[in-house]
Image (cartoon, helix red, strand yellow):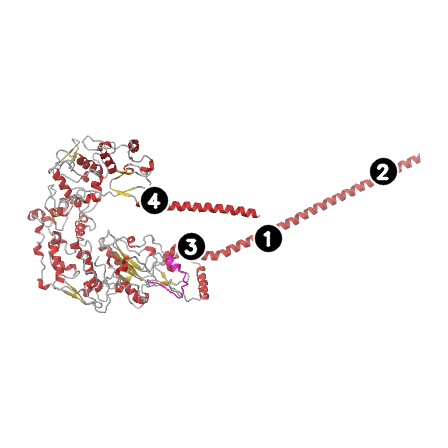
Amino acid sequence: MKKAEARSEVEFGQRMSIAVLGMLLLCSLSSSGCSSDAVADQTTPRADLVDIGERLGFEELERSTVLFPHDLHTEVMLERKEDCTLCHPVRPDGYLSAHFQQLEEIGDEELIDLYHDECIGCHEETMSAGKAAGPVACGECHRRQPVYVSSSQPFGFDKSLHYRHVKAADQKCEPCHHEYDEETERLVYIKGKESSCRDCHREETEENRSAFKLAAHEACIGCHREPPPEIIVEKNTAGPQLCVGCHDLQHQLAIEQIQNPPRLKRGQEDFVLVSASEADLASTKLRTVPFSHIDHEEAADTCRVCHHDTLDPCTKCHTLEGTDAGGWVTLDQAMHDKLANESCVGCHDAKKSTLACAGCHDQMEQGRLPEQDCDICHAGPLPDMLASERSRYRSIDDFRPSPADIALTFSVDEIPEKVEIGVLSHEYEPAVMPHRKIVDQLMKQIGENGLATYFHGSEDVVCQGCHHQSPIGEKPPLCENCHRPDSTGLELIETGLQGAYHRQCLGCHKSMEIKEPSDCTGCHKKRPGMVAAVASGVAR
Amino acid sequence: MSISRRRFLKSLTAAGVAMAAPRPAGAHGEFAGHPESYGVLQDITLCIGCRLCEKACNQVNHLPAPEKPFDDLSVLEKHRRTDAKTYTVVNRYDIPSYHRSPVFNKFQCNHCQEPACLSSCFVAAYTKTPEGAVVYDASVCVGCRYCLVACPFGVPTYEYREPLEPTVRKCTMCYPRLLEGELPGCVEACPQQTMLFGKREDLIAVARERIRKHPSRYVDHIYGEHEMGGTSWLYISGVPFEELGFRTDLGTTPAPKLTSGALAAVPIIIGVWPALLGGIYVMTRTKEKAAVRDKDSAVRRAIEETQAAADQARKQAAEKAKVEREKAVELAVKKALEKAAKESAEEGS
């Protein structure tokens, strides 16, 4: 009997140890899960990674994808005094193929074999020559826990960079801009028909045009590598050939910026009276909108900011009814969508968050269209008069007041110099606001900005920054007329007087990044004997 | 904890009785909050981190003075949470990617529509009042601190330093003040009117309106509208809530509903199991008895049959013996007669 007990104890012990081992194993598995995260944190960011798995057309990959550090290979190649053609064959047009070891895209299976043969072959060769070489074992390229993480930034042409290229090409457009001539099956240049690359080169390669990514890499790097004779550029001063040159954030920030480059001329008008298309014109009633194309060119970095990828006029796709090409976005939506970057209202609204404007406009409803004031923008001739009156207007200044004209209708004496706010004073003494100084500063900033001048030209509208929702006039109603001093928050106007004052003043100061006041006493001195709290958020 | 053992046991019994009453599972899910209940909308974009709310909270709740005065903003350098002496804290968050950084956020009880603390409390120390406040009754608390564990927001705190009668401490939404028609202390004190007190439904409408008017200023979410089945304290923010330490993993199911299925089964088990087990017992016993009875009768029958068979055999044997005896007698008589006849014939010749 005793023996049996002892044996069962031994068995129990064995089982326990197995269980403990199992649990340890589980723990180690789960902790290795954690440590893999830790490893992921230690990955090196690189802007030159090519995700080879992504280039293959498989839905699922058998092994983890390969993140190929392109610049690392370029550097080694340069060290060995080799050429890009080691990996990228030269195309008939003289540019390098963007594909690895092939002129045209080949099948996925063939591509896998090609990568394996060539990569491992070269690494082995290098190794046998006694040099440091890349991996030959499967898991060292196909890493489950990648050692790199992509920090590649998208890159685009802004007007400064465009100008530098125009200059280098001696004002010629044809080195870059081309159209496909179906008859001759050749690329030709047509003056005045220049468009953005993305207009034809889309996401994927189509029939007779390569994908944008492919075209951009082949053309940009091809030209940077061996500029054609018409490009005036000293040897080795052309643009980047390494990935980081365009795609690394630090390199991007270091690209030389030309301030106010000359316009990109493509036969566009300086000034337009924006209306619906000819076909829609008869069914519109609103006045046309005076639009300074030249001013907008100055304000925008690229044509694509408004024109998407094409350089067509808005009304080609955005009609009153909408078209398929325009994504069924109607003309009025295209112009007034407050959340779209390309629309008038959306873009103007975004401008309101610049420091000079944000003080007043951050507090106002975003994208609100003044119900009584459509004619601020719709100020041009009526649609049926457009043909006859078009020639009367030559520039936006026919509609925009001159900065001198936007002076307030009151005399300086009528604007209070200082306003004492003491209605709530209890712990603190009344606050004294430099009223006229604020008005003067706002007026000055409005006058310095063409856009602001256009919209603040009438009827002392600047006063509405603070004296909102009340008639514009010499003596606006008092704040406490609406904002109750004893507010419980349950009234129609939920903001009480104290909240309204603090939000208006501090909100504006924060939006305009005005550092003062750094604490409560910056506006109102504390009364003797009262303990003051310091408002920290103001200063920051 | 002024509760005697007797009272506790009594309340437990009462709870047991209440639990035993049949109640459909999932009945909690239908509760959409007290109609017309109040709440607070906290607009995080407005807070300037002045800590006047903390000061007001301390005063109206008669809490002990803090180590550092309320106008000392150096406390914001460290992330703080509520404790037994502090019902609300303001924390500062530096968010480099946000143009209006730093962000200040005030933390206190969220006053859930269906509070986890309440559902975890087996002495019903918590009440969700029709006004919206979640209040705690120290007089029935037994100090188990399940509520501290249950609260998904980590709100209730405990007077660990109170040796004699420690209680759970948390924001009451200034319930006593609400009953007097006054605003919560923090709401009233905020110079920015960061918080708006009102009917919860109205506050949601106000929050939506603010987001609609300023789509770039706010993230399009009202925290507390649906989290954990909804809270009476609502928030809108300019940065994603997780960046301000809000839990965004909570889902929209109220805490009580997560356990109501299992808990609703308790009365059923309490009610049904005795009957079930008793029934099984009775059935087993009946079966056993029947088996015994069957066995006895079978044995008896077997004995009887055996007995009968034996009697029969004996009877047959006896009869056979009798017949044979008679035959033997007959034979003997016959033989004797034949012998006598033979002898007389011999004498006659």
Q: Is mark 1 on a helix, strand or loop?
A: helix
Q: Is mark 3 on a helix, strand or loop?
A: helix
State yes or no: discs 4 and 1 in contact (Cβ < 8 Å). no
For discs 4 and 3, the disc positioned in front in the rendered view: 4
For discs 3 and 2, the disc positioned in front in the rendered view: 3
Dot 1 alpha-carbon crowd within 10 angstroms: few under 14, some 14 to 19, many 20 or more: few
Any mark on residue A36, and which? 4
Any mark on residue B289, and which? 1
Q: Which of marks 2 and 1 is nearer the N terminus?
A: 1
Check if mark 2 and mark 1 are on a common chain. Answer: yes
Q: Which one is in front, B44 or B50?
A: B50
Q: Which chain carries label 2?
A: B
Q: What residue type is labelled 4?
A: Ser
Viewed as shown, does residue B140 lie left or right of A318?
A: right
Residue at mark 3 to residue at mark 1: CA–CA distance: 39 Å
Residue at mark 4 to residue at mark 1: CA–CA distance: 67 Å
For discs 2 and 1, the disc positioned in front in the rendered view: 1
For discs 4 and 2, the disc positioned in front in the rendered view: 4
Q: Quadrant of residue B131?
A: bottom left
The x and y percentages for residue A467 are 16, 61
Any mark on residue B335, and which? 2
State yes or no: discs 2 and 1 in contact (Cβ < 8 Å). no
The x and y percentages for residue A522 are 19, 62
Which residues fall within the magenta stretch? B132-150
Q: Name the residue under label 3.
A: B262
Q: Is mark 2 on a helix, strand or loop?
A: helix
For discs 3 and 1, the disc positioned in front in the rendered view: 3
Residue at mark 3 to residue at mark 2: CA–CA distance: 104 Å
